Image (tube, rainbow, N blue to C red):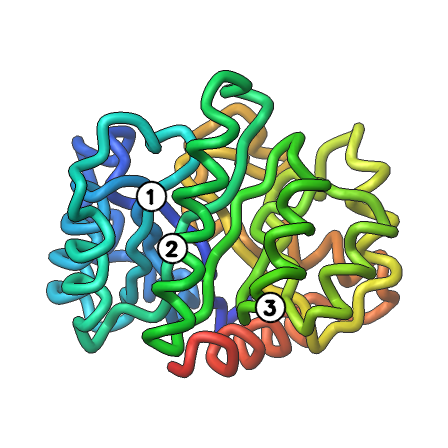
Amino acid sequence: MYNNIFDSHAHYTDKAFNDDRENMLGSLKESGICGVINCGADLESSKEALKLAETYDYLYFACGIHPEEVENLPENYIEILKDLAKHEKCVAIGEIGLDYYWRQDTKEKQKEVFEKQILLAKELDLPIIVHDREAHGDTLEILKKHKPKGVLHCFSGSVETAKEVLKLGMYIGFGGALTFKNARKAVEVAEILPLEKLLLETDCPYMAPVPMRGKRNDSSLIPYVAEKIAEIKNTDAQRILDIATENTKLLFNI
């Protein structure tokens, strides 16, 4: 059995866990999980992530506005995030970024909210957790402008984009999508990625790895991703888990 598993990106506030959240979070340590970063997607889920982090010692949280949630924000949303981020178990501003796959109509608002949250993270000396879907050009442009520390989670870009991200000193997060049959680009990125820049994640309840694809994801399934990376890097999965955990603690100052 694997151990020392750190899930750098989860959503345990999601309604998919409403029926068994307590049992799930109470049992994860038995599966070798040593830590989880629970990410907010809006103000409400960020507040809920804080409460869960206060309840479970191995849970940390990030607060932020996801690009799909940029409409109808209160004027003082940055102040609200700032207050949440002062909590001792808040380790990042996230999940933030750009998503042009689901939303083309809010591009300018997405960019504005993304930049404001990056500036908040820099003010508080926190890393950011970046969502980038079908928006690689604009995401890179904003990251190059502000040069924050952080991770591009669930990385879906090309090798060329990955190299630009690495030049900025940022990390790249891989989850279940890496194990999918059509994951050619992700596999190419994993091949060139220095292990000291790798984070492992679930993005649960979404993106369960093969052979669990289509089912609800949770942190106990990360070893499937580690095994895939170990295969690509010609090493063993526990070594991948250990390195990724060390990287997570370093980036998020845990």
Disc 2 packing (10 Å; few <14; some 14–19; many ≥20): many
Q: Which secondary structure, mark 2?
A: helix
Q: Can residue 134 be seen in this view?
A: yes
Q: Which secondary structure, mark 3?
A: loop
Q: Where is residue 140 in the image (x, y as percent from the top left)?
A: 68, 51
Comparing 156 with 117, the one in front is 117
**Nearest to viewer (mark 1 / mark 2):** 2
Calculate the distance from the C-alpha at mark 3 to the C-alpha at mark 2: 13 Å
Calculate the distance from the C-alpha at mark 3 to the C-alpha at mark 1: 19 Å
Calculate the distance from the C-alpha at mark 1 to the C-alpha at mark 2: 8 Å
| Kind of residue indicated by mark 1 | Ile
Q: Earlier in the sequence, mark 1 or mark 2?
A: 1
Q: Are marks 1 and 2 in contact (CB under 8 Å)?
A: yes
User: Does 223 sit above or below residue 254?
Assistant: above
Q: Which mark is residue 147?
A: 3
Q: Which mark is residue 117?
A: 2
Residue under label 1: 65
| Kind of residue indicated by mark 3 | Lys
User: Does 97 sit above or below residue 9?
Assistant: above
